Amino acid sequence: MKFGDLEIFVVSDGRFRLDGGAMFGVVPKVLWQKRLAADDRNRVTLGLNCLLIRSAKHTLVVETGTGDKGDAKWNDIYGIDHSVTLLDSLARRGVAPEDVDIVVNTHLHFDHCGWNTRRDRDGKPVPTFSRARYFVQRGEYEHAREPTERDRVSYRKENLQPLAESGQWVWVEGDQEIAPGIELVRTPGHTRDLQCVRLTSRGRTAFFFADLVPTTAHLSYAWIMGYDLYPLTTLEQKKHWIPEAVDNEWLCFFAHDPETPAAYLRERDGQVVAEPVQEPELVATE
Ligand SMILES: [Zn+2]
């Protein structure tokens, strides 16, 4: 869709599944299963919603999904559904990997940076976007190289190391405008150095909530993922950014919502609700 001087599209890397309990933290299953149904292994189906942003000078991708480097066992555990992939979705928009000059990873969990790299003919992981600079918070990168016992399953070296070798990483510290109207905003909680993306053009603002608010079900302040390393910090961040988005009519994007990748937020009877954006070009799997 046209967004001032920018064009923004949701591009999908398909869907995957995570444990429903981990996805909703302390929220009881009797409540969360009304929002997202659990399968026979207690998993909920989630979207892998990425953004393609075009400006006069740049072609950006925000998030790169799970990628396709997992083996059969891993694909089964996470219920990977690649009926559409990020590369397919970009191709449908006429974008080849070498057209992309900026990639943003909000953080480096495997479901946000999988297509950072892909295997070459010899099976070696190499950068997917050969001309791009890849932006991530420096603290997140450092943590990803030495995660704790609690979160090391979320990080995979093959998504990171080839870009260190090719010199394509750009490590950001705190908030930074990386191109006109395209700003990275550090939003700690899920990890210490998670970042969201704020887009502004001609008086309008859009906000990619990353894993601060992964689905519209997580708009309720107490609905915080069990994965979060600093849940009370997540709570503070939500209490800052969600009212901003409501009051200023921001176009909001949700990385893992299976149905509603884009919405405006409205307050109704003291609750924040998502009003899905219906434009056909924003539908993830067309
Ligand atoms: Zn994450």
Image (tube, grey):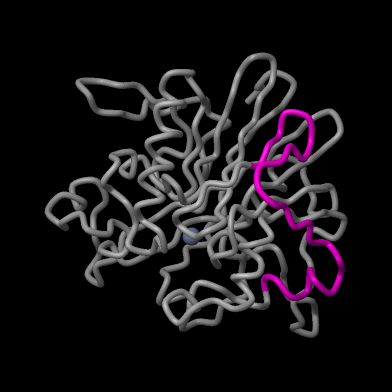
Q: Is residue 50 left or right of residue 76?
A: right
Q: Where does residue 50 sit, x and y in percent of width and height?
A: 58, 47
Q: Where does residue 154 sit, x and y in percent of width and height?
A: 50, 72
Q: Is residue 131 magenta?
A: no
The number of numbered badges drawn on the structure is: 0
Q: Residue at x 25, y 20 (%)?
A: 268
The answer to whether residue 210 is above or below residue 39 is above
Q: Looking at the figure, which quarter contains the N terminus?
A: top right
Span of residues in magenta: 159-184
The answer to whether residue 103 is above or below residue 22 is above
Q: Is residue 223 left or right of residue 65?
A: left
Where on the picture, by quarter, is residue 241?
top left
Where on the picture, by quarter, is residue 29?
bottom left
Q: Is residue 31 left or right of residue 238?
A: left
Q: Nearer the viewer, residue 236 or 273?
A: 236
Q: Where does residue 165 sit, x and y in percent of width and height?
A: 84, 74
Q: Residue at x 35, y 21 (%)?
A: 266
